[in-house]
Amino acid sequence: MRHHHIPAALERRVRKRARNRCEYCTLPQELQEATFHVDHVCPRLAGGRTAVENLALACVSCSLRKGARVTAQDPSTRVIAPLFNPRTQRWADHFSLMRAPKVIGKTAVGRATVLALAMNRPAVVAIRLAHMALGRLHPA
Ligand SMILES: [Zn+2]
């Protein structure tokens, strides 16, 4: 998937739409060394197309953890839930930064995705704290 060629113009559209942030964990590309990936929301293995309506900007960690997964277990209810889809769902409906620097899942989709993509791994929590200190991340 990440070896799949994305035309430069398409990548620019995806980056601009995402405002250069990971559409899963919200990490900004700014201050990150590794270039974020253009992720297939519906994986190519599952027939997902390389088209703007099936692409999302993802930080390297979210992208690698997501891979070809489309579901994960909600740790609260143990129900298997679909992973968050940034094209058809609204981030704020499923996640909260009220307890920033941690991302809290508000729904089965949100909780399953927080866990599956390790959105509160220590390195990203430290980066969120740094962005908060710079006034670039607002708990909401
Ligand atoms: Zn991410």
Image (cartoon, rainbow, N blue to C red):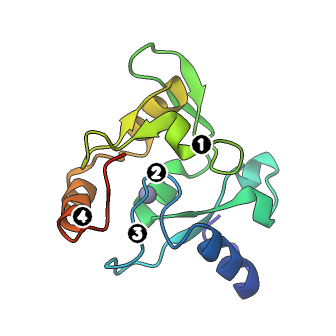
Alpha carbons under labels 3 and 4: distance apart = 9 Å
Q: Could you tell me which secondary element the residue under label 3 belongs to?
A: loop
Q: Nearer the viewer, residue 134 or 63?
A: 134
Tell me which amino acid carries mark 4: Ile
Tell me if residue 92 comes above or below residue 15 in the rendering.
above
Q: Which mark is residue 69?
A: 1
Q: Nearer the viewer, residue 12 or 117?
A: 12
Image x and y of residue 15, in percent: 60, 74
For disc 3, the neighbor class at 10 Å (few under 14, some 14 to 19, many from 20) is: many
Q: Nearer the viewer, residue 16 or 75?
A: 16
The answer to whether the residue bearing label 2 lies less than 8 angstroms from the nearest atom of ligand 1 is no
Residue wearing tag 4: 127
Alpha carbons under labels 2 and 4: distance apart = 18 Å
Task: For the residues labelled 1 and 4, say whether their Cβ atoms are less than 8 Å apart.
Answer: no
Quarter of the image that includes the N terminus: bottom right
The answer to whether the residue bearing label 3 lies less than 8 angstroms from the nearest atom of ligand 1 is no
Tell me which amino acid carries mark 3: Pro
Q: Could you tell me which secondary element the residue under label 1 belongs to?
A: loop
Return the disc, 3 or 2, that comes first in the chain's sequence.
3
For disc 1, the neighbor class at 10 Å (few under 14, some 14 to 19, many from 20) is: some
The answer to whether the residue bearing label 1 lies less than 8 angstroms from the nearest atom of ligand 1 is no
Alpha carbons under labels 1 and 3: distance apart = 23 Å
Alpha carbons under labels 2 and 1: distance apart = 8 Å
Task: For the residues labelled 2 and 1, say whether their Cβ atoms are less than 8 Å apart.
Answer: yes
Image x and y of residue 56, in percent: 63, 61
Q: Nearer the viewer, mark 1 or mark 4?
A: 4
Q: Residue at x 66, y 71 (%)?
A: 14
Camera sees residue 8: yes
Return the disc, 3 or 4, that comes first in the chain's sequence.
3
Alpha carbons under labels 3 and 2: distance apart = 18 Å
Residue wearing tag 2: 65
Q: Which mark is residue 28?
A: 3
